Image: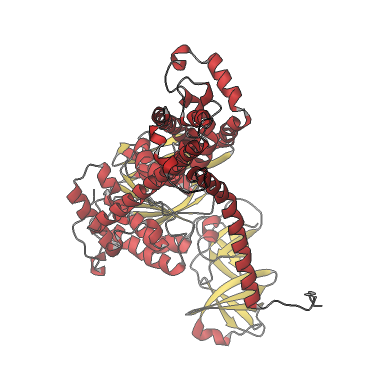
Amino acid sequence: MVTVLDTGGVVPSVSQRRWRARLSRGLILWIFGFYVLAPLYAGARFALQNDNGNFSFHSVAVIPAQAGFTDAFWYSTRLAVVTVIGVLLLVVPTIVYAHLRAPAVRPVLEVISLLPIVFPPIVLILGFMHTAPTWLLIWPYHLAVLYVVISLPFVYRSLDAGLLALDLGTLVEAGRSLGARITTIVWRVILPNLSSALVSSVALVVALVYSEYTMASFQVTPTLPVWIAQFSLSDGHITTAAAMLSLVGAWILLAVVLVADLGRLQWRQRRAQK
Amino acid sequence: MTTMSSTSTSRDDTAPKERTGSPVALRDLRRRFATTTALDGFSLDLEPGEFVALLGPSGCGKTTALRVLAGFETPDEGSVWVDGADVTGVPAQRRDMGMVFQSYSLFPNLSAHDNVAFGLRLRRVSGAERRRRAGELLELVGLAEHRSKFPHQLSGGQQQRVALARALAIEPRVLLLDEPLSALDAKVRAELRDQIRFLQRRLSITTLFVTHDQEEALSMADRVAVMYNGRAEQIAAPAELYARPTTAFVAEFVGITSRIPVVRRDDHHVELLGAVVPVRGQLGAGTGNLEALVRPEDLAVRRSDEGPAVIVNRSFLGSMTRLEVAFGSTMIKVDVAHRTSEELPHLARVDFEVVAPDLLVSSAR
């Protein structure tokens, strides 16, 4: 017996179905785009519009001349560099080892890497200030230790996904059969194949360091977010422009690393053609 | 050690050469994983330049044996000898063994050329020499024009050829092939099978090849080791393995076999389908029911209206036709030349003739 589906007597034509599919795709993209771009647009508009409603780059141009900006910017930049180095040195060997030699530990590591999300930053900084040894507290970049902790969820997940996309075991065995030690394989095979994951990790860490306020507000030397918060009391347009600039800076950094990576691949291809 | 002296891929060069590869000996290897015994006293000798295939069903221990030889697994007991030296404790990266894996395993961040040159670079071969040798090997596997492509730009067959070139570039003492053809489609598999055998013969390199595909093993290897439950059931040349299997497992795993009940006449003879036939080896002292393991070509059939069996199925195999003949409750496979098969239609009654000089007999299931 054949069952006939009741279509209500109306069967959409192929062109109607395609039009509906295009509409659905467009709607989803518009909603997503609006959600991401609207705050950026609002920030940029507020930063570039003066009190009379006219647009100019005055707020951006005067940023470097503002008291304390340069120190705060470079301090945050140095913190970002130290944090990136610290988190990569901590996570990369751990996660590679876990994938290669102790896969049973991976779920445990994943849970541990998520813990920083559970603890409020204020708890972390207060705990750190009361328990860290003095030599660490007087180190100018001790904030990076905490930034390493709070960036763990992003970095771990990004690198974990990157490693899962590789047939790691076979690549390592192929390297070993050709005479490579594990360190050589990590350096020449695994890390280059994790470049996308590493770039996104670095971008996330940099963005985090340039935006974290709670913990930074406890420091004597102000970071960029602290400077922005303090300066916003005197001029909101300039501080918003500074915040937007830090965001654009992170994007530029990401773009530079991606272009460099692309260039490296093209260089390899050209060299192989010779 | 082998050397690359020419880039010609002429098939005239396939004549056997003096074997110059390394001798390999696997001695009484045992390896357990939790409750599973992967290797249970496995031993195998490879002559210099010999191509040996490890053949067996999944879980028989063939890949473990290969990995022990490669240095990726350490045996619980036993030893591995290459060139007369015990290498059991030598790490994989110092064994000088080229390996080709089932899953291609090319480094995704390197071009085909750089993949092939990877091992040479580790050996501090100069840039010019590295380029020359990598180019030579890529030409040998027919991929010279693809040298600058990355793995994702190559097909599966091309990737596996690059992997082969990469393994050969380091002039390994032993070439290890871990089911390198299983992920490829039938046509590419056949091409690459020929290419591997051609290169192996040309370079005269000792090779251990793991496969579960009997056609691959029988067509490529000088000798085949059929493995079962972590042991070598039989190690023999392909023709001997097929024609004279020594155990029921080998007879049934390699080629097509029918089990037919037989009656014991004496220690050396059984009665099969009314004929007294010599037994391969000697029958044991047991009194249980026995069965002969019979190849499709071990029997001949002729049409007979009073015959004891009926043709229930016919399969066209090109030059041959395979008949499935019902003899009571026993199904027997018999191959006949296609030209004569027209005289043997579906449901025709037939009589048998045993044409095999002797038969393997085992206990009934």
Residue B73 placed where, x, y %?
A: 44, 39
The image's colour scheme reads: secondary structure
Pick whichever, A124 or A188, lies toward us.
A124
Residue B14 placed where, x, y %?
A: 26, 65
Pick whichever, B2 or A122, lies toward us.
A122
Q: Is residue A155 left or right of residue B347?
A: left
Pick whichever, A99 or B191, lies toward us.
A99
Q: How many marks?
A: 0
Quarter containing the C terminus of chain B: bottom right
Residue A165 appearing in the image? yes
Q: Among all residues in the image, which is located at the extreme right? A: A1
Instruction: Tell me the residue at 61%/74% (across/down).
Output: B324
Q: Among all residues in the image, which is located at the extreme top? A: A134
Pick whichever, A63 or B127, lies toward us.
A63
Instruction: Tell me the residue at 37%/64% (across/down).
Output: B192
Q: Is residue A174 left or right of residue B349?
A: left
Q: Quadrant of residue A269?
A: bottom left
Residue B49 placed where, x, y %?
A: 29, 53
Instruction: Tell me the residue at 49%/21% (across/down).
Output: A219
Q: Is residue B307 left or right of residue A99?
A: right
Residue A186 against residue A83 in the figure, above or below = below
Residue B362 placed where, x, y %?
A: 58, 57
Instruction: Tell me the residue at 28%/52% (across/down).
Output: A267
Residue B261 appearing in the image? no
Q: Quadrant of residue A57?
A: top left
Q: Among all residues in the image, which is located at the extreme bottom? A: B343
